[in-house]
Image (cartoon, helix red, strand yellow):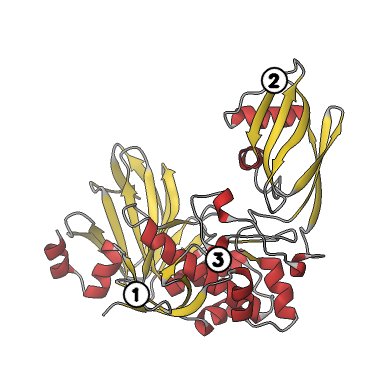
Amino acid sequence: MLSYLIGQLSFSRLTKAICIIAVIICCDAAVVTAKSKMIRVAILRDVDHFTLGVEGRHTLIDYNSGEKVGFGIRLLPSLVTFDHGKIRIGDKVYDSQRLIIDPRLDASLRVNDKHFRGMLIIINTGTALTVVNSIEIEQYIRGVLYHEISDKWPMEAISAQAVATRTYAFYSIEKFAARDYDVTNDVYSQVYGGKTAERYRTNLAVKNTKGLVLTYKGKIFPAFFHANSGGITEDASELWDIDLPPLKGGIESPYSVNSPHYRWKRNFRLKDIQDALEKSGVKVGTIKEIKIKERNKSGRIRKLEVTDRDGKSTIIEGKIFRDALGPNVLKSNLYDVEMKGYYVDLIGHGWGHGVGMCQWGAYNMARMRFTYPDILKFYYPGSELGHYKEDD
């Protein structure tokens, strides 16, 4: 298949279409070389329909055979459906497991209400459709920043975010090379809005930091970030199978204090917590009391004890409890519990998992005239700032 595709596409187009990416870390800790600078972003997963439009010339290619199966000057917004195991675009049906939409020149892709650069790969999973945007990594970052940080913030804070975003992207490319996509477009990877999300100042931060990534001892690592640390960062090993000095946490961050989300309070009805836990697969009786059982070194809750009205106690991990209630509802695991009869008050600090860079901390550091390398060094101790370059 590869030799056939070479005959059909230019090298750059072939790189986009195949989008098999391998990141190789050099012995030099300051340099990361990549065989490709493309990233695959899942913008829709397991859907039965979506709307597709193309503003300009484009070609449709069967991914597996490399055969051109269609072309056009423009595609008006058309309904794409999973039709009896095939891909239907408007009134045309394609018997392809994977269909590439390859725009020419600066033709823009539209999926539902968002515009995208790069290419699309529509994957027929056998039961539904998954849509992957294959895009050059610097363009990807331009589509991320506005959703992760305000374009009105100081440029040094936006630049720090650009480097962290690029670093996380390369880590994901390496980690998920065998998967159909490297990242998703939501909070479980990095929120990505495509061309629609681009803004002048965030684009400028991407340009000013082009190619810059963080490494530790010559290896790229997941440069996690979050909204507000609540005053102290978290150890990545509390959440994932990751044990690296730049992500060890325990960094006291006075720059997070007195920022939005530094303090919060939420009141919950115990019945609502019971329903949320059971919906997530944790069976508990009618809740009578919730107690903190164990905290970790950052003060975040590692375990809770939930006691029902029959006296039965259930130990629940803090991260499972937060996921059940919703990470945007229970903002962090750094909180106290106050029982109020049939209700409970959770009074806490920070927003997010707390690992890596605190975005509001970066904002305040930038206002105090710290540079983006200063910010990154503070939140990722022991890391080095270096360049990635494409493998020749």
Q: Residue 210, relative to residue 118: is it above or below?
A: below
Q: CA distance from mark 3 to mark 1?
A: 19 Å
> Mark 3 or mark 1, which has the lower sequence index?
1
Q: CA distance from mark 3 to mark 2?
A: 41 Å
* Amino acid tagged 3: Pro
Residue 42 or residue 111, whichever sits in front: 42
Looking at the image, the residue that sits furthest to the right is 340
Relative to 124, 223 lies left or right? right
Question: Dot 1 lies on which element?
Answer: loop
Residue 276 or residue 23, whichever sits in front: 23
- Residue topped by disc 1: 26
Residue visible at 75% across and 81% down in the picture: 368
* Amino acid tagged 1: Cys
- Residue topped by disc 3: 246
Residue 73 or residue 374, whichever sits in front: 374
Relative to 254, 245 lies left or right? left
- Give the quarter of the image for residue 226: bottom right
Residue visible at 66% across and 54% down in the picture: 352
Residue 73 or residue 9, whichever sits in front: 9
Q: Please name which of the two marks, 3 or 2, marks the residue nearer to the observer.
A: 3
> Mark 3 or mark 2, which has the lower sequence index?
3
Q: CA distance from mark 2 to mark 1?
A: 54 Å
| Residue 27 placement (x, y as % from top left) | 35, 75
Neighbor class of circle 2 (other Cα within 10 Å; few <14, some 14-19, many 20+) is: some
Inspect this view and state whether residue 59 appears.
no
* Amino acid tagged 2: Gly
Question: Dot 2 lies on which element?
Answer: loop
